[in-house]
Image (spheres, grey):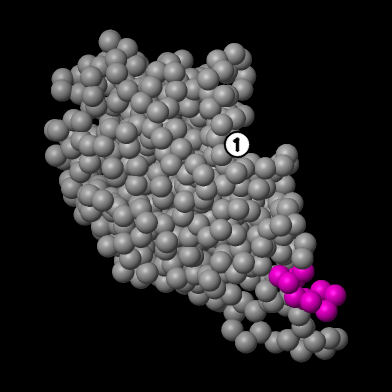
Amino acid sequence: MSIRNPVAVLPTHEVTNTPPHMGDQDLWTSDLALREGITREGAAWAEPQMAAFGKAAGREDVLEQADQANRSGPELKPFDRYGMRVNQVSFHPSYHALQDLAVSNGLPNFAWNNAGAGGHVAHAALNYMLNQIEGGVLCPIAMTYAAIPTLKASPAIAEEWLPKLLSTKYDKRDIPVGEKTGAQMGMFMTEKQGGSDVRANTTRATRDGEGYRLTGHKFFCSAPMSDAFLTLAYAEAGLSCFLIPRFQPDGQRNGLFLQRLKDKLGNTSNASSEMELQNTWGLLVGPEGKGIKTIIEMVQGTRFYCAFGSAALMRQGLVQALHHTSHRSAFQKRLIDQPLMQNVLADLALESEAATTLSLRLGRAIDEGEAGNTEAAALARIGTAIGKYWICKRAPNHTYEAMECHGGPGYVEESIMPRLYREAPVNSIWEGSGNVICLDVLRALQRDPEAGVAFLNEVESARGGNAHFDKSLDDLKVALADTSDIELRARRMTEHMALVWQAALLVKHAPAPVSDAFCASRLGAPWSGSYGTLPTSVDCGAIVQRARGLS
């Protein structure tokens, strides 16, 4: 809620030494790492839109809408008042306002409507800014973005659906897609008995004219009000990918039976459901028996969202911590000027900048891969898994540490920090939890020789810029060559690859205080992973000033 001119003089005391309300944020201008990355990674042409959206998404009333959408979460409406099945979910008006803000600014489809150099970089930046304020509304946005290349592989489906998915008009109406001005796409694959092991799925698909009929269940179906969904089911030739619309070709509702909504830890504005499929009509996407291969490109897209979404949470947590400590004093000195607090803030800033920098680099790899650069495409394949694992793993503790910088005021619901904290684990769990992702990295190294070569070429380009980096890169090469107990070491190896990649990017592109501090703390002496443990040689003040957008 917007608060103007609160009364500071109370009957028993005067309220002093408290930070002012933050008010509107400029999510673009204040973020030097983001601005520099946009230029460096080929999206400078999009700066005007970035600047405008950074102001629009950072408005205080948008933050209030995000709070409302989470306080008053979605409600399941399986039946209408006459007892007929409708399988709907109702949302607070603030949720729809946020969706309209996102869709009208191209967040689901900016990269596809602006194909070419920097398209995916700019796409990530737009979503990164809104994700700082509210992550739940971006679930259907992410799945819509990620579904588009999968649908392009089926021309007849693409002809019907792509114009709606590429629209910048948000249409919340629950009507057949042909009558809508814009549409959104969902995805659900997992079932109770298998989880990430989708080959254990039991949902079946049988031919019915030009389509199929599916029967089975799905255990975690987010954004169930999407206009269509991509899913997996067993057809005659094996596990296959299908598009299931909310409405059948004759205009009747499809057999998508919502059972209940999940009562989640966070991500509350976004509905996640359990669904049963009963004689549900669908269209085959890609060849029968090639369902995983068909849908994996969509999974790559949603994992990209997980990476920069977690980077966004870290950035906003840091922004909140910087604001609080800049206006709060203890022991005759502002918190931000206290040496130990400076160490904590600088460490948080390093983590945030490394996450943002790696996310934008991933965007450029995707852009270049789509332009035909095979090495970039290989880097994007393995790099998305590396980035998704590590950035998402670092977000929860980073958000907690930013909360701790506030003391008690960060632990109350009037602050954004509890909501950020509840949101922080979700990206690590969704779209492949930690073990699944690390095993994907191993598979990429073993089955896709180009991926390992592309990664090593990428990080080798920073050699000579920092002694800690050079040694860690040498150690990584030894670890990659060692095939003993490789599955047991998968997490450690993926973490090592992520840290070396982040360090390489910072060595090449960040100011020396940032890159030297990152390499010394993450790659130098034994590192606990806790924040506020930077070596005494680090220029914490310079790092904090950069994080505040002042250098």
| Residues in magenta, as a range | 329-338
Observer able to see residue 195: no
The residue at the point 66 percent across, 84 percent down is: 6
Horizontal and vertical percent position of residue 397: 67, 47
Horizontal and vertical percent position of residue 236: 28, 10
Horizontal and vertical percent position of residue 256: 36, 33
The residue at the point 77 percent across, 83 percent down is: 15
Quarter-wise, where is residue 95 in the image? Answer: bottom left
Q: Report whether 211 appears left or right of 464.
A: left
Q: Amino acid at mark 1?
A: Lys
The residue at the point 15 percent across, 23 percent down is: 210
Observer able to see residue 48: yes
Name the foreground residue: 32 vs 518: 518
Secondary structure under the numbered disc 1 in the rendered image? helix
Residue 337 drawn in magenta: yes
Q: Report whether 528 appears left or right of 519.
A: right
Horizontal and vertical percent position of residue 541: 66, 67
Name the foreground residue: 531 vs 457: 457
Quarter-wise, where is residue 151 in the image? Answer: top left
Residue 80 drawn in magenta: no
- Number of other residues with Cα within 10 Å of mark 1, as a class: few under 14, some 14 to 19, many 20 or more: few
The residue at the point 85 percent across, 86 percent down is: 12
| Quarter of the rendering occupied by the N terminus | bottom right
Q: Report whether 6 appears left or right of 334.
A: left
Question: Against 118, is 321 above or below?
Answer: below
Name the residue beneath numbered marker 1.
Answer: 471
